Amino acid sequence: MFKCLVLQELYGLSDEEVEYQIADRRSFQKFLGMDITPDVPDHSTINNFRNLLKEHGLVDELFDVINRRLAERGLLLRGGVVADVTFVETPRRCP
């Protein structure tokens, strides 16, 4: 479940968006250690897990540990973007 929060942080996704992306993207499933399965955590489960971590003051602490370990290996954590792009042909204008 924590890996779901990592994906959210990296890609700036809402709970609903991360649920959709996990179901849609094999790379997300692979990162989470999931086989191709319909058992994707829903947005309310992700939200409840985050709230539980917040109640115990663990969210920032866990991300700090991840960032320190990555920094020890010379890696820097940066966000990315998930884009769903559709190209549409339009008629050309005459000058």
Image: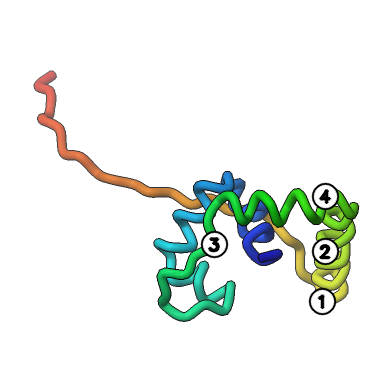
User: Mark 3 sits on what residue?
Assistant: 41
Q: Are marks 1 and 4 in contact (CB under 8 Å)?
A: no
Q: Nearer the viewer, mark 2 or mark 3?
A: 3
37 lies left or right of 61: left
What type is the residue that disc 1 sits on?
Arg
Query: Crowding at label 1, few (<14), some or many (≥20) Cα neighbours within 10 Å?
Result: few
Q: Which residue is drawn at 90% across and 52% down?
A: 57
30 vs 5, left or right, is left
Q: Position of residue 24 (x, y in %)?
A: 40, 62
Q: SS class of the residue under badge 1?
A: loop
Instruction: Using the image, determine if residue 83 lies above or below residue 32.
Output: above
- Which secondary structure lies at badge 3? loop
According to the image, label 2 marks what residue?
67
| Quadrant holding the C terminus | top left
What residue is pinned by disc 4? 54
Of label 2 and label 4, which has the lower sequence position?
4
Residue 79 x %, y %:
65, 53
Identity of the residue drawn at 46% across and 80% down = 35
- Camera-side residue: 72 or 48? 48
The structure residue drawn at horizontal position 58% and vertical position 53%, both measured from the top left corner, is 80
> Which residue in the structure is indicated by mark 1?
73
How busy is the neighbourhood of tag 4: few (under 14 within 10 Å), some, or many (20 plus)? Answer: few
Where residue 17 sits in the image (x, y, percent)? 50, 48
Whether pointer 2 and pointer 1 mark residues with C-beta atoms closer than 8 Å, the reply is: no
Nearest to N terminus: mark 4 or mark 3 = 3
Nearest to the observer: residue 10 or residue 32: 32
In front: label 2 or label 4 = 4
Q: Do the residues labelled 2 and 3 touch (CB within 8 Å)?
A: no
Report, in whole angstroms, how far the alpha carbon at label 3 lies from the one at label 1.
31 Å
